Image (spheres, rainbow, N blue to C red):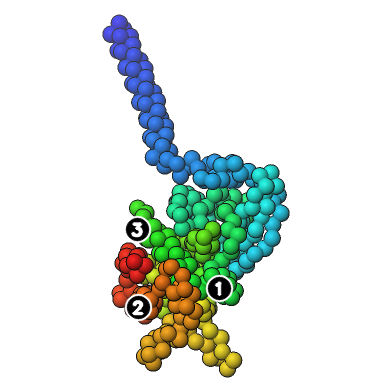
């Protein structure tokens, strides 16, 4: 009997020891999983934190928008200054700060999912360059509406400046200043980032003018915030206005080369004062500016394409422009508009050639 009691006692102690060990193992595993979960959150870094903040505060602020509030933005009296299939532009007056901003409203049905939008917004909000319109804040509403807040530039868009009959648009010094500013901004997008940012919707309507006609490119990377349907509508709008590279079929195929094509069209606009697609009185007869320019080269009528008073205006002043400089500018514009993407110069080459032309 004594031996039997001893055996039972040993088994009982052993069982308790095993249970205690198993209990300790379970506690250790649970603690380890919690630590790993915290590590994963930490590795998620700013993106996870900022997504939580966005859900809680509904407003992301960047440099220049630190003093903004949701109340400022939503209660600002606004005037519609532009519309598209995917959104609306407002000139809004902030009552509290007595300032004017540009509000870009993206329709809920056109914007991408929040998990895709937030990382893009963070990247676009970090970009600062003297020739790019900065993103100051981003608001996401409860019904899926999204608002981007930018500075407002009172001189308006380049497209209006070119075609409003203002004599300043005929001056070589102004044409050159705008051209090289646009090139510098695009160079920063293509080469100044860890990964190139494709503008995707480059046209004269999306270039705003500040003091001394300094150009600021807007809308860069906007296609990344849209769903595939809205992105394709953006591309179709670009095609209808004459800025789409011939090889482009879908918006997701945009590239540095397609941006260069659009830049070439803008350079031709500046030099000629003409719209990318020139409507004729005869039905179904439109002239596409790059094609018109190629015909002029073949017919030796290049001088018919640029502002006739460029030489007259500039030669009367201290900064004379030569026909050779105009010809080189024209040739560079046409190289950008090459039907073959491989024949188009990259933005670094374009910027270098523009600087040589200005010497």
Residue 191 is marked as 3
| Mark with earlier residue (2, 1) | 1
Percent across and percent down for residue 182 are 44, 64
Q: Is residue 38 above or below residue 127?
A: above
Q: CA distance from mark 2 to mark 1?
A: 22 Å
Residue drawn at (41%, 85%), measured in percent from left and top?
302
> In the picture, which quadrant includes the N terminus?
top left
Q: Secondary structure at mark 1?
A: helix
Image quadrant where residue 334 sits:
bottom left
Q: CA distance from mark 3 to mark 1?
A: 35 Å
Judging depth in this view, the residue of 139 and 177 nearest the camera is 177
Percent across and percent down for residue 164 are 59, 74
Residue drawn at (56%, 54%), measured in percent from left and top?
150
Q: Is residue 21 visible?
A: yes
Residue drawn at (37%, 22%), measured in percent from left and top?
24
Image quadrant where residue 16 sits:
top left
Q: Nearer the viewer, mark 3 or mark 1?
A: 1
| Mark with earlier residue (2, 3) | 3
Residue wearing tag 1: 167
Residue wearing tag 2: 324
Q: Are marks 2 and 3 in contact (CB under 8 Å)?
A: no
């Amino acid at each position: 009997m004594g031996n039997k009691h001893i055996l039972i006692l040993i088994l009982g102690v052993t069982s308790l020891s095993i249970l205690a060990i198993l209990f300790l193992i379970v506690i250790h595993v649970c603690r380890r999983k919690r630590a790993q979960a915290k590590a994963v959150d930490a590795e998620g870094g700013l993106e996870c934190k900022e997504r939580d903040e966005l859900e809680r505060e509904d407003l992301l602020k960047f440099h220049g928008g630190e003093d903004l509030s949701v109340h400022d933005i939503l209660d600002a009296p606004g005037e519609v200054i532009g519309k598209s299939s995917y959104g609306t532009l407002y000139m809004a007056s902030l009552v509290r700060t007595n300032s004017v901003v540009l509000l870009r409203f993206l329709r809920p049905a056109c914007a991408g999912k929040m998990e895709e939008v937030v990382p893009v917004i963070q990247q676009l909000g970090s970009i600062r360059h003297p020739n790019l319109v900065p993103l100051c804040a981003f608001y996401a509403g409860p019904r899926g509406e999204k608002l981007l807040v930018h500075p407002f530039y009172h001189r308006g868009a380049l497209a209006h400046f070119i075609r409003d009959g203002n004599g300043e648009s005929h001056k070589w010094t102004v044409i050159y200043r705008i051209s090289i500013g646009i090139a510098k901004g695009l160079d920063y997008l293509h080469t100044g980032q860890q990964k190139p940012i494709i503008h995707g919707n480059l046209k004269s309507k999306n270039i705003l003018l500040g003091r001394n006609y300094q150009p600021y490119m807007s809308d860069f990377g906007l296609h990344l915030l849209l769903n595939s349907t809205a992105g394709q509508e953006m591309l179709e709008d670009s095609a209808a206005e004459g800025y789409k590279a011939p090889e482009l079929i879908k918006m997701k195929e945009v590239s540095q080369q397609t941006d260069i094509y659009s830049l070439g069209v803008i350079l031709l606009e500046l030099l000629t004062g003409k719209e990318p697609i020139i409507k004729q009185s005869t039905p179904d007869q439109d002239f596409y500016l790059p094609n018109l320019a190629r015909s002029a080269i073949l017919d030796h009528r290049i001088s018919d394409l640029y502002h006739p008073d460029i030489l007259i205006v500039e030669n009367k002043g201290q900064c004379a422009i030569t026909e050779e400089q105009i010809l080189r500018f024209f040739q560079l514009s046409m190289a950008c508009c090459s039907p073959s993407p491989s024949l188009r110069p990259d933005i670094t080459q374009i910027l270098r050639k523009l600087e040589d032309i200005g010497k």
